[in-house]
Image (tube, rainbow, N blue to C red):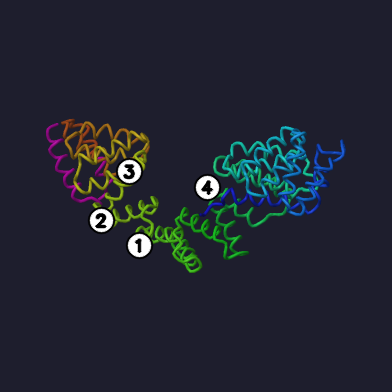
Amino acid sequence: MRRFVLVVLCLFGWAAIHAQRTVPPAAQSATSASAAAEQPVAPEVAAAEAAIVKSDWKTAETRLDTWLAGHPSDARALFDAGYVADAQNRLDDAVKLYQRAVAADPKSFESRISLGLALARQGKLAEARPELLAATTLDPGLAGPAVKARAWRALAQIDKENDPKAASDALLQALKLTPETPEDTLLAAQLAESAGQLDAAEAAYRRILAANPKSKEATDGLAHVLMLQKKYAEAETVVRSALTAWPDDPSFTAQLAGALAAQDKAEALPLVQKLHADHPNDKAISRMLADLLYTAGDSAGSDALYTELLKQDPYDAGMWVAHGQNLTRLTKYDGAAAAFEKATQINPADGDAWAGLAFAAMKTGHPEETIHALTMRSKSLPEVPATYFLWATAYDTLHDKDQAAAYYHRFLDAAAGKFPDQEWQARQRLVLLEKKH
């Protein structure tokens, strides 16, 4: 919802190149880098192109089929045939014909860009990319720089998720050929967001909205960036305004719930409960509700949702951690330990999973496992008072007096009066441990 759909861009690009057909195809093709005046246009092809100008697809197809039966490597006719199939939404046929046209004339800009855009519309982005890249190196002829810019913009869309730098470079190439459009600004904002340049992304989204306050994509993007910046009150304002324009939109409703939850506003829970009732199969909404129920103290309700979610995605370490945290609250320590252990197997670098496992292991009478889990946790997270206390009690249980005393002291230094019950216990244990030395 918040991202451009590549198909939309590709359709736009396809329409742009074929909008040049306001001149006869003969004139258009004759200006291609390789078309030249090497030979006259065959009467059958010229008649087909005249029919194309009139959108008389049946006549054009009949004439082109007749000609290609005897001239199967005519690049111009193959392109025209691909165009006719494309115009009738016969995408598979169009791709095959464009591929034949490229094979017959690899330097045809029209064939390259049309093939690349058609492949992108099929979702074959890896195959589309080299065709579009090749198109950017060719003379666009009467199509002009604006259509070559479409190829660069399509490349930017293809690369934006996996290679933001390449996408940025492609967008810059497009802007060298044509003025910046609102779609370019939106893409630039998305690329800045992907690169973690949140201030730049926010500024770009705001520029779009200044020119077009009804841009749903920019509104969605701005709200998302504000949430990432932890500007929750601003995000709430943006999303509430959006919901007046797009009432009950699930994306904006979810963002509002997130902004409210981040501010600990009670309105968040009933809002997400309603959202979940309306969209019971939406995993993101279910997960948000599970988190809110946990925060509200309803661990049983939260865990029921996580149990179902884990059936659908058993390799999500974060959900195993959340499941373990719920079971810990419910004092089901054996199950919690198993959940945390599963999370560590999926993601050995998850410090929260190791912390949960350390606590659950202590509760189930396995202090040696607690020490191992704390050791693993320390590789990714700094020590906090709670972990110092776990270290101390684990060593104390194992009768390692020196280590226990050392960690009790570290705990007391870090706690600084914030954990009175545990601090009292630590002092009592230190009296006993140090008395015997």
Which quadrant of the view contains residue 374?
top left
Magenta-highlighted stretch: main secondary structure? Answer: helix
Contact (CB < 8 A) between labels 3 and 2?
no
Amino acid bearing label 4: Gly
Q: Quadrant of the C terminus?
A: top left
Q: Which residues are magenta?
A: 409-437
Amino acid bearing label 2: Gly
Callout 2 secondary element: loop
The disc at residue 92 is: none
Q: Position of residue 32 (x, y in %)?
A: 80, 41
Left or right of 239? Residue 290 is left
Callout 4 secondary element: loop
Amino acid bearing label 1: Lys
**Residue drawn at 63 percent across, 45 percent down:** 90
Q: Which residue is mark 2?
A: 297
Q: Position of residue 38 (x, y in %)?
A: 87, 36
Left or right of 48? Residue 388 is left
Q: Which residue is mark 1?
A: 274
Between the residue at mark 3 and the residue at mark 4, the CA separation in whole angstroms equals 30 Å
Q: Which residue is mark 4?
A: 196
| Precedes in sequence: disc 4 or disc 1 | 4
Between the residue at mark 4 and the residue at mark 1, the CA separation in whole angstroms equals 33 Å
In magenta stretch: residue 357: no
Q: Which residue is mark 3?
A: 310
Amino acid bearing label 3: Leu
* Viewer-nearest of discs 4 and 1: 1
